[in-house]
């Protein structure tokens, strides 16, 4: 079988990558170009079949993402409840006769402080 000759023009960046690859493998740039063409034609001629596992992975990631949102909401609610418990217990322990409005303001301040601190501690 007689080989056919082609003239190929490459961008400078691709030429540099081709030469670096050739040097790394210890072969000529022409040999790397020939391998690249063969691999490219094979990949285009036999594309990978659409795999259902990719769709399953995407569906699972979406499900995990939804669950994480639910967990974040639950943790947020638990934090608020803990702040409320602390503020009411503190008020009762000090014997202070505070109104619910004052304690609610303290709860919200404690909650906001804890949220702010949790954001600041991230690396």
Image (tube, rainbow, N blue to C red):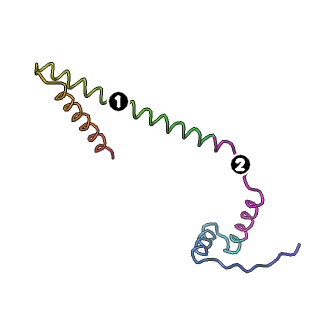
Could you say where residue 60 lies in the image, as x and y percent from the top left? 57, 38
Q: Is residue 23 left or right of residue 69?
A: right
Q: Is residue 4 left or right of residue 12?
A: right
Q: Quadrant of residue 31?
A: bottom right
Q: Are marks 1 and 2 in contact (CB under 8 Å)?
A: no
What is the residue that sits farthest to the right in this orientation?
1
Q: Which residues fall within the magenta stretch?
A: 34-55
At x 39%, y 33%, the residue is 73
Could you classify mark 2 by the number of other residues whose Cα lies within 10 Å: few (under 14), some (14-19), or many (20 or more)? Answer: few
At x 63%, y 40%, the residue is 56
Q: Is residue 57 above or below residue 6?
A: above
At x 22%, y 33%, the residue is 110
Look at the magenta stretch and give its main secondary structure: helix
| Labels in figure, total | 2
Q: Is residue 114 left or right of residue 41?
A: left
| Closer-to-camera residue (24/54) | 54
Magenta-span inclusion, residue 100: no
Q: Quadrant of residue 23?
A: bottom right
Could you say where residue 35 lies in the image, as x and y percent from the top left? 72, 67
Q: Quadrant of residue 33?
A: bottom right
Which residue position is annotated with label 1? 77
Q: Secondary structure at mark 1?
A: helix
Q: Quadrant of the N terminus?
A: bottom right
Which residue position is annotated with label 2? 50
Q: Is residue 44 left or right of residue 114?
A: right
How far apart marks 1 and 2 lie (CA) works out to: 43 Å
Observer-side mark, 1 or 2, equals 1
Could you say where residue 20 lies in the image, as x and y percent from the top left? 59, 71
């Amino acid at each position: 079988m007689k080989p056919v000759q082609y003239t190929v023009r490459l961008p400078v960046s691709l030429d540099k990558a081709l030469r670096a690859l050739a040097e790394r493998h210890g072969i000529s740039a022409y040999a790397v170009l020939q391998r690249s063409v063969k691999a490219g034609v094979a990949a285009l001629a036999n594309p990978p079949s659409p795999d259902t596992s990719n769709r399953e992975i995407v569906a699972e990631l979406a499900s995990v993402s939804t669950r994480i949102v639910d967990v974040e909401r639950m943790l947020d609610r638990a934090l608020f409840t803990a702040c409320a418990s602390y503020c009411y217990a503190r008020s009762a322990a000090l014997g202070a006769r505070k109104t619910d409005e004052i304690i609610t303001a303290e709860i919200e301040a404690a909650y906001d402080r804890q949220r702010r601190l949790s954001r600041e501690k991230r690396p």
